Structures are given as C-alpha cells and as structure tokens.
Amino acid sequence: MADLEALKAQFLALQSAPPQVRISESTCLDVLQLLLQQQLLRVLPSSNGKEFITPERLEQELRLLITQKKGRLNVAEAAQSLSLSSEAVGLKAEELCRKSAGLCILDGDLISSSYLSNLAAEVEETLEPNSLDTAAFAAHVAAAARGLLLGASAPLSLVDAAQALNLPLESLIQAANDLVETGAACGQLHGKVFSPRAFTDAQEAQEALVEGIWIELTPLLPSALSDADISAVASLLLASLGVSHQGPSKGRPEAHVLEGGIIVSETCLKNILEALEPLLQTKAAETAESDWEGDCKRKGKKGRGAKPSGQQCEAVTRAEVDAAGVASWNAIPEVAQEAVWPMLQLRIEQASVLQQKQQKAAAEGELLQRRYEVLCLGLKAVEVSSRASANCKGKRPRGALCPPSQQQQLQQKQNPLAAHLFKSTVFEILDKLILAAFMHETGEVVEVSSNNRQQLLSRLSASGDESSSSAASALQQAAAAAARRDVTTIGVDIKEAASECHVFLRPPDKKRTKQLLSELRATWTEAAATAADLQQHRKLCHAAANLLLLKHTGVWLEFPQEDWALNAVSALLERQDEREPPAEGLEEFKGLLEALQNGAEEALQNASASLRAKILPAGPRTLTPSLRNSSRVRVKGSRLPLGAGLLQGAFATLSLNTWSIYNSESRISSSVLALNIPTCRIELAVICTRRCANTEANEATRFAKVCSIPI
C-alpha cells in the first residue's frame, strides 16, 4: 500500500513538472484522431484537418452570422466562411432549428422569424390591397397624362396633378414616363416634376433677347402654323417677356420680328454696328476724299458760290460685312442673314451718314480755326501797315485833319491789302459761321453768298428762338464791322459770333504766332526756289514779296499774285525802309516787278537771277527731313499719297509738328484740313502737289485751285 501511494505521488509530481519533450504536430493530429474514433473527444475538424471547433462554439458562430446577415444565412456560405464541411454546418443548422422555434431552413438558407416579419412588412407596403386596374382605367390615366404633358407650358408637378384629378400617383408617373420615352411628350421628367421643352425654349429665347442675340421660332413651333400665326406667336412671346417690338413712340424697339419667324434684338444690331465701326470710318474717309476732289472741280478759281456736293457715303456691301470677320454676324446662319440683312443695311447706311457728318463737322471746325489764325496774322499786318503810313517821313495821310480813329479807318479803306483780307478771309469766315448757325438751329444746309447774306441773317433773327436771335445779333455785328473794314474790332466780333454759333475759335498766342511765321518763312523759301527753278517769274516775285514781308516787317497776310497786290506790298516795304535800314532784296524785288509790268524777257531773266541771289541761300537746295524720300505723308491721323515725282518740294517746308511719315497704304480723310502754309482758299482737304508717272497731265496744277502757293 505504501508503494502505491509513493507511485501516485511520483505520478502527480511528473504531471506537475513541465514537459521535457515536445510532441510534433503530426503526432498531435494522430492522437486527436484516435480520441475522436474512440469518441472520447467531441470536436469538429476543419476542412484542412488542422483546426477543430467544438459544437458549442459552432452554434455561437452560426447565431452571430445570422444576426450579421439580418436574419437570412446561406448554409453553404456559412460553411465556407467558417472553413468547415457543409454537412457539419447543415447538421448544426438543423439542430438549431429544432432547439429554437424562431429559426427555420428554407432552400438551404437559415432564416429567422425577424427576417420573415420584415419581408412581410415590405410586401405589404408594396402591394395595394383592395384594388384592381382595368384596361379602361389604364387608358384613362394615359389620356390624362398625355393632356397634362402636352398642354404644359411650365414645369408641372405630377403630385399636384394626381391630387387634382384624383388619380393614383404611381399610375400617373408611369404613364408620364411612357409618353416621354416614346417621344409623344417633349420634355424631361425629373422625379415627380415634368419640364416641357417649350418652357426651356422660352427661357433660351428670353436669354437670347436679353444677351443681345437672335432666335428662330420656326423649328420650335408646329409645322402647320402659317407665317401670320408665327408672327402672332412671336408677338405674344415678346409681350410675355416685356420686350417692345412695335416701335415705341420714343426710341427704337428692343426686338424686331422678321419674316420666317426670326426675332433679332436691337442689341444684336448695335453689336454688329460697333464691330463694323472701322469699316464705316474707312468708307467715310474714301467718300470725303472723292467729295473734296469733286468740290475742287466745281468751285473753280475762287471756290465761291459752289453748292455742297451732297455725296453720300459709299454703301457697304454684304460681301464686305462678311469679310470683316464680325463674330456676332458670322454666328447667324445664311438663311437668317437673308432676313436680317435689310434691317442691318439700313442701320449701316445711317451710321455711314453719321460718320461722314462727324468728319465734316470736325473738318469745318479745324478749317475755321486755321482761317481765323490767318485772319489774326492779317489784322496784325494791316495794323503795321497803318502805322507805317502814319509815320511816313515827309508825308501826311489823307484825312489828317480828322480824328485819329477816323484817320486809321480811312487809311485801312485805302489799303488794298486790307480790302483783300476782308474779302478773302473775313467774309469767308462769316459765311461759314452763318452756315453753322443754320445747321445747329434748324438743320438746314444753306448756300451763303454776298447776295443773300443779310437775308439769311434776317431769317435767323426772325426765327423767334433766343439762341438763334443771339447768334444772329452777333453775326450782324460782325458783318457790320466787316463792312466798315474795322480791323480793331473785327477779330473780337468774329470770335464772339463763333461762340454764339457753338464754334470755339482760339486766337494764336505768341508761341503759336512764332510757329506760324517760322513755317511761313520755310514754305515761301521753298516756293521761291521752286519758281526760280521753273523760271516762273511772277510766282517768284510773289514768293519774294512774302519773304520780304516776313523778314522786314515781322508780319504776314494773304495777297494774290496780281500787280496791284505786289505793288501794295512794295509800297509797304518802302514805307518800312524810311524808318529802318534798307531791306535786303527790296530793290531786286522792285526790279522784277517792273520787268513783269514791262514784259521784257531778257529783263525778266536778269531780274529773276538778281532777286534769287538775294532772297535764297547759296548752295544746293534740299527738302526738309519731314518729306525727303517719303512716299506717304500723314496729317492729324489721315494719310496723303505723294507721287514719285514730287515737284521741288512744294510741301517740303511744312511743320514737323503737323506732318509725319508713313509708308502704309491709306486714303485722304475729310478731317485732313488746313496745312501750315499761306493759302487764300483752303477748303475741306489737304492740297496735294505731285506728278504721277502714269499720267500725262501734271496734277500739281490742282494746287492753284485752292492755294496761292506757286508751284
């Protein structure tokens, strides 16, 4: 017995002691298989044979999977996820169904009672008990849906429609879907709201009119509508959008309904016109140039009494508009362009006329300013001439017993240069101011001459308008001063009359006067050299008179090439010499003047040579840098072509401040006006002197039509 107890104690000690030898995995598996065969151990092997699970743990895993799958678990999927055999999992699932009344197996799925309850609730919600749709009822719903969708002009809520018609919402939505899918109803169904295509088209039309583009209604309307019906629909559309289209009393309509159901907005036309502005300006410049050339042919030597040409700007063709590359115009299809073009053409013609009027207005304003500067220089020269006459040694002017003011007026009336100044400049400015007054007050273009001047002033004064009366009063005062040849007040009177006629005239200040006299000296020096080279003795004498007047008196005024004018200048220079040293070249000038009056050719040659030696610098004559080797000349933004054979630089002395050289092609604009040269009749264009190689006639003679510069 004692031995048995000792053996037991040793066995217990051996069991409590840690193992000294580890058993291999295969040995463990063999031991477990042996225990399973002897039914000494209750575990289930995995599919790989290396893992085992107890039945209790398998039951827990299945219950957990059923919960995760929301009450429905496929047995095969559960066996695969647990890495067990399908038979073992199926047996355990059947055991669970026997233990729990809330579980059952249906077609290999383990289903809980909660899953069946949820499924029954969903089926109950889906099914509509106590109802049966007949074919007649379905047709009634389809017909109602068709009427609703085809008659809708704005987004339609099917929920509100179903309530209003007492129809099932689901049946109405299904019928609407069928109509949209088959194309029977044009639009889109977004959930329970139907948006008809007519509504989206109307929105696009409204946006088109607001953004300044065009629309075509014909593709948006039924083909059975006539042109009158389409026009009526267009009018209703514009009225609903609040867009005027029938020409309001003030301003233009915002949109225009054209033939073919085309609606074009006024903004679209304005955008196209703005893009065509450069083309219209070019056309207006070309018309102004041709208009000036025609005026020169009509006016003759003096240029008086000629009527305005009235030439309209050359029409802009559709081909030119297409070639202009206007995006808003090119975006319109060819068919729509045919309908829009007549209205656009009318706008283009109106804009072209406006461009031409603006250029003429700017040209006339610049012309008046230049002529006013010439007048101011001339008045200063007349004043110097009067002082020279009054201070002449050993001579008493006629009317010496009269008061000084009357003596001065008498001397001015006896002065032929002063008479010519009033005739050629003062009355010309007055006539243009009268024309400007009529244009501003009545818009009428009148022909002003010495015969109807007083009559027009009376008409202007009798118009009853305060502005017209004040303008007429100022013009009458200036005309009275001009008739008296009152050099003391005529400059101020003309300036005030111009202000009343809405024309601003600026008298030249000292700096501007100095600039003008400098340009005149250079101009007449070049003119004298040109006349000497061409043996034009009278023109040489005229140029020399201008140079001597500028050099020895410091003043200048316009005078023609006639003998009386040259004699008057000679007398003025002689009176000036009595107070100062003799003027260099005066004797030679008098000799040439005498030779011109006698007509002896040999004497003319000798006198011209002597005068040229005195008034012209020695050495070869060259053009000024502003015109040397130039092919284009530009004045204040407009360009003037010069021929290859420029005649000895008739323009060679123009101011660098006025002219600049360009080598690109262009045309003369009507805004190209008076040059810084002494002229008698500068009109609405620059005077061009050139000799073209491809023509027989010398085009330089056109200079003589408007200017006293010799060529």
Image (tube, grey):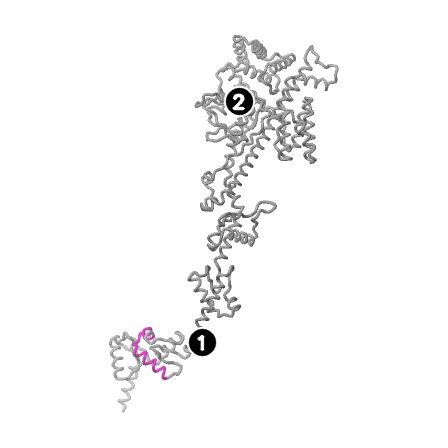
In the figure, 705 relative to 233: above or below?
A: above
Residue plotted at (50% across, 68% down): 162
Of residues 649 and 584, which is closer to you in this image? 649
Within 10 Å of disc 2 (Cα), the crowding (few <14, some 14-19, many 20+) is many
- Name the secondary structure under disc 2: helix
Vertical placement of residue 638 versus 162, above or below:
above
Q: CA distance from mark 2 to mark 1?
A: 108 Å
Tell me the residue that label 1 is attached to: 124
Label 1 CA crowd tier, 10 Å (few <14, some 14–19, many 20+): few
Tell me the amino acid under the disc marked 1: Glu
Check residue 706 for magenta coloring.
no
In the image, residue 504 above or below residue 653: below
Considering the whole magenta stretch, tell me its main secondary structure: helix
The amino acid type found where label 2 is placed reads Phe
Q: Position of residue 446 (x, y in %)?
A: 62, 30
Q: Is residue 88 visible?
A: yes
Looking at the rendering, which quadrant does residue 123 occupy? Answer: bottom left
Check disc 1 and report its element: helix, strand or loop: helix
Q: Identify residue for label 2.
A: 703
Let me know if residue 84 is in the magenta part.
yes
Mark 2 vs 1, N-terminal side: 1
Q: Nearer the viewer, residue 317 or 99?
A: 317
Residue 312 screen position, x and y as percent: 54, 34
- Magenta-colored span: 78-98
Q: Is residue 518 visible?
A: no
Q: Quadrant of the N terminus?
A: bottom left
